Amino acid sequence: MRSSRGMGPGVRSLLRRKVRRDLGRRRSQIIAVAGTVFLGVMLFTANLDASHNLGDSYR
């Protein structure tokens, strides 16, 4: 298998167009995954902060 450095400029531009086209077709799926990850991080952060605040209230 060849590395991407061995590819000519025509192959790279073809792959770049394919990636853009694929991402454009899956835009709503990408937004849904990004939103889910964002909400998961926010919920984890809120839970961790609440846990720390609860621990501090006992001191």
Image (spheres, grey):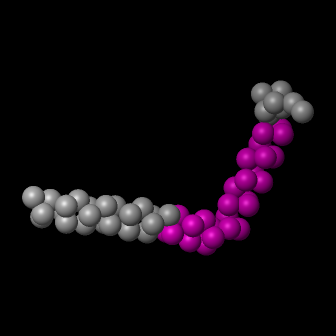
**Residue 30 visible from this viewpoint:** yes
User: How many numbered badges does the structure rendering display?
Assistant: 0
Instruction: Please give the name of the residue rendered at 45% of the width and 66% of the height, measured from the top-left corner.
Output: 40
Considering depth in this image, is 41 or 55 the residue closer to the camera? 55
Expressed as whole percent of the image width and height from the top left, the position of residue 16 reads 73, 47
Is residue 18 shown in magenta? yes
Seen as rendered, the residue at the extreme right is 1
Asked if residue 12 lies left or right of residue 33, the reply is right
Instruction: Please give the name of the residue rendered at 12% of the width and 63% of the height, measured from the top-left corner.
Output: 58
Judge whether 5 appears above or below 41 on screen.
above
Seen as rendered, the residue at the extreme left is 59
Q: Quadrant of the N terminus?
A: top right
Main secondary structure type of the part rendered in magenta: helix
Asked if residue 36 lies left or right of residue 8, the reply is left
Instruction: Please give the name of the residue rendered at 69% of the width and 55% of the height, measured from the top-left corner.
Output: 20
Highlighted range, magenta:
10-36
**Residue 8 visible from this viewpoint:** no
Asked if residue 2 lies left or right of residue 39, the reply is right
Considering depth in this image, is 17 or 53 the residue closer to the camera? 53
Instruction: Please give the name of the residue rendered at 49% of the width and 68% of the height, measured from the top-left corner.
Output: 35
Expressed as whole percent of the image width and height from the top left, the position of residue 23 reads 68, 60
Is residue 48 shown in magenta? no
Q: Quadrant of the C terminus?
A: bottom left
Expressed as whole percent of the image width and height from the top left, the position of residue 45 reads 34, 61
Asked if residue 43 lies left or right of residue 58, the reply is right
Expressed as whole percent of the image width and height from the top left, the position of residue 18 reads 77, 54
Seen as rendered, the residue at the extreme top is 6
